[in-house]
Amino acid sequence: MTQITMGFFVMLELLRPLLLPGLLLVLAALAALAAQARLRHGPIFACRPFLAALALGLAVAVAAFLALPGWTGASLGDLRAWFDWAAALGMAAQIGALAVLLAYPFALLLLTRRG
Amino acid sequence: MTDLPLFDRRQLLRGGAGALALGLAGAPAPAAASVATDARIVIVGAGAAGTALANRLSTALRGARIVLVDGRETHHYQPGYTLVGTGLWEPGKVLSAEADHLPRDIEWVREMVAEYDPEANRVVTESGRSLDYDFLVVATGLSLEFERIEGMEAGLVGREGIGCVYSDPAGTWPVLRGFVENGGVGLFGRPAGDIKCAGAPLKVTFLTLDRAVRAGTRGRAEFVYNADSDALFSVPVFHDIVERRFGELGVAINRRHVLTAIDPGRREATYATPEGPVTLGYDFLHLVPPMAAPAPLRDSPLAWQEGRFEGWLEVERDSLRHRRYPNVFGAGDVLGVPRGKTAASVKAQVPVVAENLVSVIAGREPRRSYDGYTSCPLITRIGSVMLVEFDYEGRLTPTFPFIDPTREGWLPWMMKDRMLRPAYYAMLHGRI
């Protein structure tokens, strides 16, 4: 079994309590995208909503980075080795990227006009 | 409708829904083609090894009659005991219902085995029920032998300043917290002989000390570590690191001190030393009892009858197949092998045992080999761990090459606190 496969199943166990709410959030985002495309006949790609989602994602990433050590009962001061920083920054970046992906469809609805 | 570039929308939705359903349903990972057999396999013990093997063999063998024998209804995530015993985790976090981890197509005999009769290919339960087998897997774990310490019994844990994360982590935390708050003399250490998670006595020492530092009571507490030998850790590089850290933190080290008796009323512990018995007073004693294979196994023909591993399950150290009874395999803490009494060892052993057993059932010789992989996330304080991994020869075998195993870090702590429990359950269900 490759490390990637192993990592997938470990993440699946770790995130199991969040799978259903996560699914609902993804469905809501897809519904927003569909609504934008089919009901409002608006653009799927637009700069302003993307920048808004990006700004939100950056904020989420910063918050995640600051919160991650505390999530494990530790503190920022416990990040000492280079792999500590790399791991915390990497995880925060992934959380921020996810926030961008989920926020973008809603930003499209809010920040563009009907087509 | 705007088409999604590069993907067929229907395929993407189907694949995503399938993966999500798989995750939500908790289905095991897809297995290689299974082997058809009507073999009757008895697995003794529903701990980490037994439960993981039940799941793996259920998938790998089509038609096999698998019987799991264990009287315990609750499954314990033992790697979490140190965190519960030092107040970092709630007790409920290490408990789950055994039934939630078992495949539906096995028979679960809710009793303990009282007798092994490998000549007749059967085991006998406490109620006298005889279970015949074609193949036997022994995964009983081990027994905590408190009675080998004069004056000690398991019920004393959580009272009279005595803690033991191995037997009662929830009961240990209040007495440990009392020591942290009030100070005094804290005695720590480990017994002679093989024990499971040999790093736990060190982890408890480090965490208790860190608790005292954070509480501002370190100046009122004296820490003494009583090592059973000259070594604090079996791998020399980590012995050096621990010895240095103990020195930096002001932990006194007594070598070749083996606990032989306690007087709970007077709070005194007596140790056998090369110079004769030594009695030490304590306010807190983290007592780690001697450990052995459970008595029915120990007293059976399946155990090593003599030598370094006398009393433990006699298996080949690489194939984990019994040396004298070829239809018997073993996994977990019960093994009489040089290393491997950790949950991480079980994770390495289970695929070996499962595949080798399937090979034997299919008429082939075992091909997989266990290299003695052992892992001990050595907690040095809250938020900091050294990810110690090694094999039979004591060679370092890091899973993640970018993590220096001799360096404390937050990332290994995060793994210990957040990732290893999900990994354990994934292993339990046969997915990794």
Image: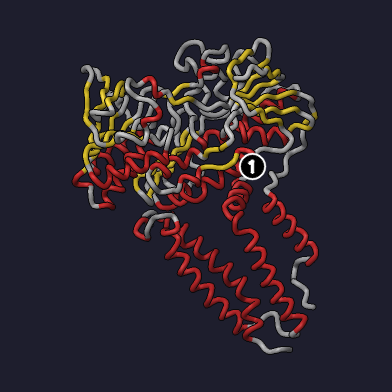
Instruction: Give the side of residue B374 with respect to residue B207, left or right.
Output: right
B255 vs B121: above or below: below
Instruction: Give the side of residue A69 with respect to residue B139, left or right.
Output: left
Q: Quadrant of the N terminus of chain B?
A: bottom right
Callout 1: few (<14), some (14-19), or many (20+) C-alpha neighbours within 10 Å?
A: few
Chain at tag 1: B
Residue in view at x 45 percent, y 58 percent: A71
B354 vs A41: above or below: above
Q: Which residue is mark 1?
A: B100
Residue in view at x 62 percent, y 80 percent: A107
Q: Quadrant of the C terminus of chain B?
A: top right
**Number of residue marks:** 1
Instruction: Give the side of residue B220 with respect to residue B320, left or right.
Output: left
Residue in view at x 39 percent, y 30 percent: B155
Residue B348 screen position, x and y as percent = 57, 35
Q: Quadrant of residue B221?
A: top left
B246 vs A85: above or below: above
Residue B285 screen position, x and y as percent = 30, 33
Residue B58 screen position, x and y as percent = 72, 34
